[in-house]
């Protein structure tokens, strides 16, 4: 690099020159755009994080009915806002390992039944109150008590007793669970003063930013928390904003015109086009979320495994990934687990699209030829109606009389999903296999939307849960995966990527498979050049 | 009692009845929708226990009639209640949203109404000549394009490509008036294009209708210029139909801008109501419905009264 360029890039890094200006001057000196961009990025990296500025994200998934009570969060905007002002005990890092937040350290007993979380000392809530183990316990109490309407209720139900021991929060489980810390990372379980009993919506937490204004369904604004325990290493922005942009076109336009710095849920069909824009980049990361067709294995005709196998063979997974996800995703194997999970077994054979086999299984099932109704709606997952149509075509080619019934979005989750025997749906995935299976495939699970009730499967799940030997656990999980793949009521053709788009000004962006937009930690981990 | 006062009193009474009827209709409509507010709040993550807990807390186990009358009683005392979904006071939240919608509607009307009438007058003056044809073709084109399309086109070219105005119309109380107007310039432009044609065509038609009358011929014969004829003799007699169409469009600017609000992420009433309808938040939907109904009924009443005042036969009864 010649001196002139070096000088220019230092100026740009110091903020004395915009990136655009730098690119223009570099181009004038005969440097290609790609080379100039790399040069700039390197210079920025060498300079380290820059302090100051405002980080604004445009997020789909916010309503004017949202509240700041973590127990009620179910859509992206409140969850995004929550990661600004609040923190859980621990967090799942981008590499799938547990990172400590409010907890300074934790340890489990040998039988994985008792877990002790040492609460970080000397840190404060945004209202100035010191964080104590008592606050942690009260938080868990609020989410576990019988009147709770918390979305985390199902997760924390296994807790038998809790107590405070000095600066340690200790909980005891009825059945050992080696993955307990992962459950504590659930976004609902933000540690609040006194557990949030007195005012759950006060938005007081230990997060890197403090909530300044909250207009539900419009935006939230934040200022940097001056007392944040993470210090100077993180939370580089002076202020942050979460702007609700539910309309996909409005979201894209806002990013293109620089009104926001990053957006979530880029539609797969425009992602490639958007990526061509010079001032931004599409960032996708394969996560654990998946789009599915679920069959109730206890309801005719889906109680016949041959018919389930026929349908599983009749779906063209690659076509769905190509056409519905536009390549932003990966094919699934009729089990809710993929390589994004720890202890995933890659050796489980991938089910192929095979019309001959589908026809064979269909014949064996002895189905009377009456229409098999698949219910779908636009809201089931993006592209669900089109995906169902593609499924119908390939199934009919195998002689399976699949019929589509399109349902309204309104009331889909109450009237169709988990009610009708065969419908389209989605799952966001869970951080670990145990939690995913426990949520939807344990016999007693509330959300057992395939009616998969197998004592042998439950037994394996529980034995894996308490097993601390990773190799043994992997073996059990592999068996369970094979069983689901062969006999389950789940047709899982594809895992969808999280597709975000980020302005080139934002530095330090790392893909995080735990959630969209760096699992909503952009405000904490990125900075602007 | 003066006949005009009597007329106005009658209309007011009728309006109240209409409002009541509207509230019943909205309540019935939201009650028969599938799923209830508890189910919608918890969504896919609902468990039977959390559902039951939330239903109990929100009072959804009471019969519909009880809930309806409890709500109506509150409204009569000026209390719109609290939203079921997030427990916020409806009157406060809605007042904020409504003022933003009215702000947008006001500025759109300030531009659209005079412009439409002026264009209508020009079209009449140059009837069947090129200005008339140009005005008609432009306004008819803009009314033929769906409003979300106009919004997207403006957002893309003016917002993204040229960078003259923000494509997301976020306003906050800390902004000055000019800043606010700049922020909402694209939605204003979209709304203006959407309502212009209707008012312009009606103005043109109403004046042309009057222009057929014998007294216009007299006015022309006594040597008045074409604009004078229109201004002094045709326009006053065409006021009633023009006011009617203007009022309908004003009402549209308040209650019909949902799509424009969504396209530009403008925090007005439309988005607010859509969110609450999909969550089955009945008290909010009721309140919103009542306010919208009141806007429609009120503006129509004003149109009627203006028409009456413009009509000498009613103004001077026998």
Image: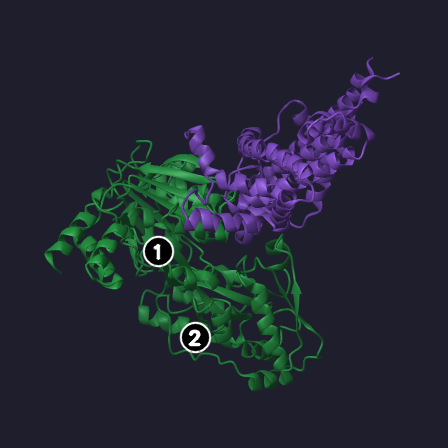
Chain colours: A green, B purple
Above or below, B260 against A475 in this view is above
For residue B83, which quarter of the picture? top right
Residue A408 left/right relative to A291: right
Residue depicted at x 52% and y 53%: B45
Q: Position of residue B68 (x, y in %)?
A: 70, 34
Mark 1 vs 2: CB contact within 8 A: no
Q: Front-most of A500 and A465?
A: A500
Q: Regarding mark 2 in the picture, which secondary structure is present there?
A: helix
Residue behind mark 2: A479
Q: Regarding mark 1 in the picture, which secondary structure is present there?
A: strand
Residue A528 left/right relative to B224: left
Residue B122 left/right relative to A117: right
Above or below, B289 against A526 in this view is above
Above or below, A480 against A180 in this view is below
Residue behind mark 1: A280
Q: Front-most of A263 and B54?
A: A263
Q: Position of residue A418 (x, y in %)?
A: 60, 60
Q: Front-most of A314 and B198?
A: B198
Kindly give the residue lying farthest to the left in the view shown: A3
> What chain does badge 1 belong to?
A
Q: In the rendered image, which quarter contains the N terminus of chain A?
A: bottom left
Q: Position of residue A310 (x, y in %)?
A: 58, 79
Q: Front-most of A102 and B155?
A: B155
């Amino acid at each position: 690099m010649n001196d002139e360029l070096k000088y220019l890039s230092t100026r740009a890094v110091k903020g004395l020159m915009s990136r655009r200006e730098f690119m223009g001057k570099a181009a004038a000196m005969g440097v290609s755009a790609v080379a100039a961009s790399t040069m700039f990025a390197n210079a920025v990296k060498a300079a380290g994080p820059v302090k100051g500025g405002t980080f604004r994200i445009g997020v789909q998934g916010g309503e004017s009915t949202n509240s700041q009570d973590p127990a009620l969060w179910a859509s992206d905007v409140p969850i995004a806002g929550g990661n600004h002002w609040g923190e859980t005990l621990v967090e799942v890092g981008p590499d799938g390992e547990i990172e400590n937040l409010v907890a300074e350290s934790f340890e489990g007993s040998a039988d994985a039944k008792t877990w002790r979380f040492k609460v970080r000392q000397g840190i404060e809530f945004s209202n100035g109150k010191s964080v104590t183990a008592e606050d942690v316990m009260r938080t868990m109490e609020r989410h576990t008590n019988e009147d709770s309407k918390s979305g985390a209720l199902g997760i924390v139900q296994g807790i038998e007793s809790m107590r405070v021991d000095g600066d340690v929060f200790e909980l005891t489980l009825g059945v050992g669970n080696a993955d307990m810390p992962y459950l504590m990372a659930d976004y609902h379980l933000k540690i609040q003063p006194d557990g949030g009993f007195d005012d759950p919506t006060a938005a007081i937490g230990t997060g890197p930013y403090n909530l300044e204004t909250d207009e539900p369904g419009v935006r939230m604004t934040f200022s940097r928390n001056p007392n944040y325990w993470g210090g100077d290493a993180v939370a580089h922005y002076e202020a942050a904003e979460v702007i609700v942009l539910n309309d996909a076109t409005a979201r894209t336009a806002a990013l293109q015109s620089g009104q926001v710095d990053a957006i979530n849920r880029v539609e797969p069909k425009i992602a490639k086009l958007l990526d061509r824009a010079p001032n931004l980049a599409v960032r996708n990361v394969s996560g654990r979320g998946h789009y599915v067709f679920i069959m109730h294995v206890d309801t005719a005709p889906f109680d016949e495994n041959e018919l389930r196998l026929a349908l599983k063979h009749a779906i063209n997974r690659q076509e769905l990934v190509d056409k519905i996800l536009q390549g932003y995703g990966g094919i699934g194997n009729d089990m809710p687990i993929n390589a994004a999970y720890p202890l995933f077994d890659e050796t489980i054979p991938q089910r192929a699209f095979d019309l001959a086999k589908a026809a064979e299984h269909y014949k064996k099932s002895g189905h009377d030829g009456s229409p098999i109704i698949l219910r779908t709606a636009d809201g089931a997952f993006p592209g669900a109606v089109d995906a169902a149509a593609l499924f119908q075509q390939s199934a009919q080619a195998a002689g399976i009389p699949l019929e589509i019934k399109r349902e309204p979005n309104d009331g889909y989750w109450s009237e169709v999903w988990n009610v009708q025997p065969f419908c389209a749906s989605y799952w966001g995935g869970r951080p670990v296999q145990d939690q995913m299976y426990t949520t939807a495939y344990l016999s007693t699970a509330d959300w057992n939307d395939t009616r998969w009730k197998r004592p042998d499967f439950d037994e394996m799940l529980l034995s894996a849960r308490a097993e601390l030997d990773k190799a043994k656990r992997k073996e059990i999980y592999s068996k369970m995966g094979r069983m689901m793949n062969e006999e389950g009521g789940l047709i899982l053709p594809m895992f969808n990527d999280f597709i975000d788009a980020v302005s080139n000004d934002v530095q330090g962006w790392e893909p995080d498979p735990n959630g969209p937009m760096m699992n909503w930690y952009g405000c904490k981990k990125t900075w602007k050049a | 009692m003066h006949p005009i006062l009597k007329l106005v009193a009658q209309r007011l009474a009728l309006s109240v009845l209409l409002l009541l009827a509207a509230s019943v209709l909205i309540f019935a409509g939201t009650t028969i929708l599938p799923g209830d507010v508890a189910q919608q709040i918890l969504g896919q993550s609902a468990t039977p226990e959390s559902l039951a807990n939330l239903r109990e807390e929100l009072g959804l186990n009471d019969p519909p009639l009880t809930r309806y009358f409890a709500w109506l009683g509150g409204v009569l005392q000026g209390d719109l209640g609290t939203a079921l979904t997030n427990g916020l006071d409806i009157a406060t939240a809605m007042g904020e949203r409504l003022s933003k919608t009215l702000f947008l509607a006001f500025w759109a009307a300030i531009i659209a109404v005079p412009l439409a009438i002026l264009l209508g007058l020009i079209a009449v003056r140059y009837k069947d000549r090129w200005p008339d044809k140009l005005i008609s073709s432009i306004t008819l084109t803009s009314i033929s394009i769906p409003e979300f399309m106009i919004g997207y086109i403006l957002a893309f070219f003016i917002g993204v490509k040229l960078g003259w105005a923000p494509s997301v119309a976020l306003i906050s109380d800390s902004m000055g008036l000019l800043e606010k107007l700049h922020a909402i310039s694209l939605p204003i432009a979209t709304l203006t294009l959407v309502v212009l044609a209707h008012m312009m065509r009606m103005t043109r038609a109403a004046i042309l209708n009057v222009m057929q009358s014998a007294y216009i011929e007299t006015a022309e014969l006594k040597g008045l210029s074409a604009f004078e004829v229109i201004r002094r003799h045709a326009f006053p007699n065409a006021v009633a139909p023009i006011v009617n169409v203007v009022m309908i469009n004003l009402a549209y600017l308040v209650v019909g801008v949902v799509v424009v609000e969504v396209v530009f992420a403008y925090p007005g009433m439309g988005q607010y109501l859509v969110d609450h309808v999909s969550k089955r938040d009945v008290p909010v939907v009721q309140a919103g419905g009542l306010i919208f109904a009141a806007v429609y009924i009120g503006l129509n009443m004003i149109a009627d009264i203006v028409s009456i005042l413009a009509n000498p036969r009613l103004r001077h009864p026998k």
